[in-house]
DNA sequence: CAGCATCCGTCGCGATACTG
DNA sequence: CAGTATCGCGACGGATGCTG
């Protein structure tokens, strides 16, 4: 999900609301992060890679319902943002290993916290959704 | 971003990787949560509402660059998932107040943790991106 | 094995106009 | 004030086929 830089116009209320939340409205790092780990496969990739380095084929087998296209693209995006690193071994046949960078590692606690919350509360969400749709 | 339920097929590696991360692969609450708070405006709405209840117009003024359509839709989605509640006051002119539910409140710590991480690290991400694009 | 290239459908999101 | 309805674009993402 590509997004434009936030408008830098006057935003009196948000300035207060969001500064309380602890970030600068003009650059909004939250969106910057959310946009990328919010993709369909990104967070899953990070979680898988957080256990140990994986090769391309291993990742494909680990997440069977991802297409090759999306696997490549997701890995590229994560690499571009510095979450993971890519190591090519000039063997025959060639092999490529992906692993979390220190930056990627540093994200994991917050990500795991979100995972934990999701696990704990997704029954409540499902229930809320059902109630809402019934009405 | 609509997503199908995860495949329930055999996923030996992910089963291990992801169970370590602490969630069930067959339902994957992470995606369920990420898909919705990963939207362009959702997290921002939650952050704004976490400071205090807001009326529709206040939210629009708080986030000037959101379209009316997306504001309504985002609020509906968050309400549907039980994050926020909607209170109509039959005054003239009519007014509607939105506020976080206890469920929504319970999400905030994890969300704020992610925000904090984003604030701390988005310079590193920007740098990584620049380095990557240069090559 | 680890990819890149191409075609193509779906949907998130914005702009605009209208209503109780 | 607080919405709903309609239109259109572009990004996301799946399927298939080709390469070093």
Image: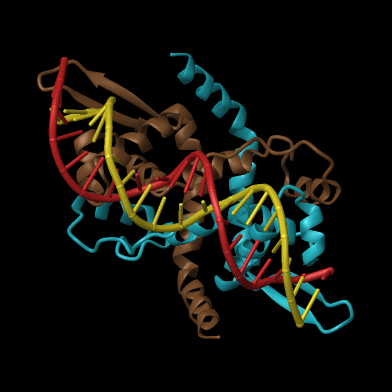
Chain colours: A brown, B cyan, C yellow, D red
Residue lying at 73% horizontally and 47% vertically, measured from the top left: B65
Residue lying at 51% horizontally and 72% vertically, measured from the top left: A125
Left or right: A13 with respect to A29?
Answer: right
In the image, D18 versus B134, the foreground residue is D18
Left or right: B40 with respect to A91?
Answer: right
- Of all residues, the one furthest to the right in this rendering is B92
Q: Is residue A24 above or below residue B33?
A: above
Does residue A108 appear anywhere in the picture?
Answer: no
Residue B42 occupies quadrant: bottom right
Q: Position of residue B118 (x, y in %)?
A: 60, 39
Left or right: B54 with respect to A122?
Answer: right
Does residue A125 appear anywhere in the picture?
Answer: yes
Q: Is residue B127 above or below residue A133?
A: above
Residue lying at 44% horizontally and 62% vertically, measured from the top left: B32
Q: Position of residue D3 (x, y in %)?
A: 69, 71
In the image, A53 versus A74, the foreground residue is A74
Q: Position of residue D7 (x, y in %)?
A: 56, 56
Left or right: B59 with respect to B22?
Answer: right
Q: Position of residue B77 (x, y in %)?
A: 57, 66
């Amino acid at each position: 999900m590509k997004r434009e830089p936030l408008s830098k116009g006057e935003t009196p209320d948000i300035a207060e609301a969001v500064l309380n939340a602890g970030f600068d409205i003009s650059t909004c790092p939250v969106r910057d992060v959310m946009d990328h780990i919010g993709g369909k496969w990104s967070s899953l990739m990070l979680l898988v890679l957080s256990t140990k380095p994986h090769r391309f084929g291993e990742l494909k087998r680990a997440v069977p319902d991802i297409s090759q296209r999306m696997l490549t693209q997701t890995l590229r995006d994560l690499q571009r943002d510095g979450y993971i690193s890519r190591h090519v071994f000039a063997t025959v046949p060639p092999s490529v290993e992906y692993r979390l960078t220190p930056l990627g590692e540093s994200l994991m606690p917050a990500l795991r916290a979100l995972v934990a919350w999701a696990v704990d509360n997704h029954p409540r969400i499902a229930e809320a959704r059902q109630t809402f749709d019934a009405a």
